[in-house]
């Protein structure tokens, strides 16, 4: 007779007691799209359940988020005016600074993270200043990104999240924040951000589709894995306090490699296409609602401590 090891026969109590991965409400970061104007709450067709809000319409959304147990938000701005240098991104009276100030009034305890990029603000849709040949001028872009970060922090942001993948961005922002007395403001760097096909719905929401070319010159090739470790190491050396992998579901292997390699808080982003793919399948009856929860568990199990997710409110409703 073969002596086989026994498996633990699990009833519901034992299953909960022995589960290895626990998702908590404090793990979740809720992205919010803010637009200019008044009395605007517009559904994003490609992202069921997600909306764009004008600043005056944030009250109800923030109240719902807090009631659900969400403790942190990530703000993306969509301005009316766009130009070649994304000037509305560093306008002290721009849409995101105004949203930050409003959130401070509505929810003083809410942790506010400001996205630092230019694609939503430029008329060409790229994440930086464009050279005459159509490429992005990395070094010139750093000056603008640092101004954006400083403007958001001066408005009251608790953390800035540069999502542009420009070389030297973290160091440039760290220097400018320090010079202006914001030495303790943390930076969450999109250290491993791939040029993914799963960003389409976000580009609709943020009106940030490139007018020409693509972003493969400054975002990572999704066929690469070692590159993620090199990029992450550089951002940590430059002063990143939190590192982020994006996309989340498509990069579980990258999350695990980064987690194993670096002892630093790690976030992952369930991006718009991943969210929409699962959400639409649920709405069509192809999956049940727990599929969304399972996807978040997978990201957490891979090693992410924090998850940026459009499903934050519904996930909170699934957590006891």
Image (cartoon, rainbow, N blue to C red):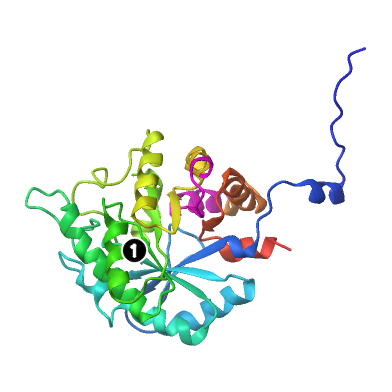
To which residue does mark 1 refer?
206
Residue 303 drawn at (x, y percent):
57, 46
Query: Is 135 situated left or right of 320 in this image?
Result: left
Q: Which stretch is magenta?
A: 259-281
Helix, strand or loop under label 1? helix
Q: Quadrant of the N terminus?
A: top right
For the question of whether residue 273 can be seen, the reply is: yes
Q: Quadrant of the C terminus?
A: bottom right
Residue 276 drawn at (x, y percent):
49, 53
Which residue corresponds to the image point at 51% horizontal and 37% vertical from the top-left? Answer: 253
**Residue 62 forms part of the magenta stretch:** no
Q: Which residue ends up furthest to the right in the rendered image?
A: 1
Query: Is 20 situated left or right of 226 in this image?
Result: right
Which residue corresponds to the image point at 53% horizontal and 76% vertical from the top-left? Answer: 110
Q: Nearer the viewer, residue 293 or 180?
A: 180
For the question of whether residue 193 can be seen, the reply is: no
């Amino acid at each position: 007779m073969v002596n086989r090891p026994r498996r633990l026969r699990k009833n519901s109590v034992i299953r909960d007691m022995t589960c290895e991965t626990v998702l908590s409400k404090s793990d979740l970061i809720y992205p919010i799209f803010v637009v200019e104007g008044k009395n605007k709450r517009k559904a994003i067709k490609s992202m069921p359940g997600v909306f764009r809000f004008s600043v005056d319409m944030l009250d109800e959304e923030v109240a719902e988020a807090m009631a659900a147990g969400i403790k942190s938000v990530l703000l993306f701005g969509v301005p009316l005016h766009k130009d070649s240098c994304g000037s509305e991104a560093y306008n002290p009276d721009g849409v995101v600074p105004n949203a930050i100030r409003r959130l401070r009034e509505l929810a003083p305890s809410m942790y506010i993270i400001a996205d630092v990029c230019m694609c939503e603000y430029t008329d060409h849709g790229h994440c930086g200043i464009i050279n005459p040949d159509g490429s992005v001028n990395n070094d010139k872009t750093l000056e603008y990104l640092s101004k954006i970060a400083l403007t958001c922090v001066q408005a009251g942001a608790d953390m800035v999240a540069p999502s542009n993948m420009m070389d030297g961005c973290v160091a440039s922002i760290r220097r400018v924040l320090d010079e202006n007395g914001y030495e303790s403001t943390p930076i969450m760097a999109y250290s491993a951000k791939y040029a993914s096909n799963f960003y389409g719905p976000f580009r609709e929401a943020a009106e940030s589709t490139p007018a020409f070319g693509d972003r493969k010159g400054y975002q990572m090739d999704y066929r690469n894995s070692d590159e993620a470790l090199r990029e992450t190491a550089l951002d940590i050396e430059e002063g990143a306090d939190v590192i982020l992998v994006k996309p989340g579901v498509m990069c579980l292997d990258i999350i695990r490699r980064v987690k194993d390699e670096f002892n630093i808080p790690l976030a992952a982003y369930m991006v718009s296409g991943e969210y929409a793919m699962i959400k639409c399948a649920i709405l069509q009856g192809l999956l049940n609602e727990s599929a969304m929860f399972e996807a978040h568990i997978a990201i957490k199990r891979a090693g992410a401590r924090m998850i940026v997710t459009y499903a934050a409110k519904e996930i909170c409703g699934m957590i006891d």
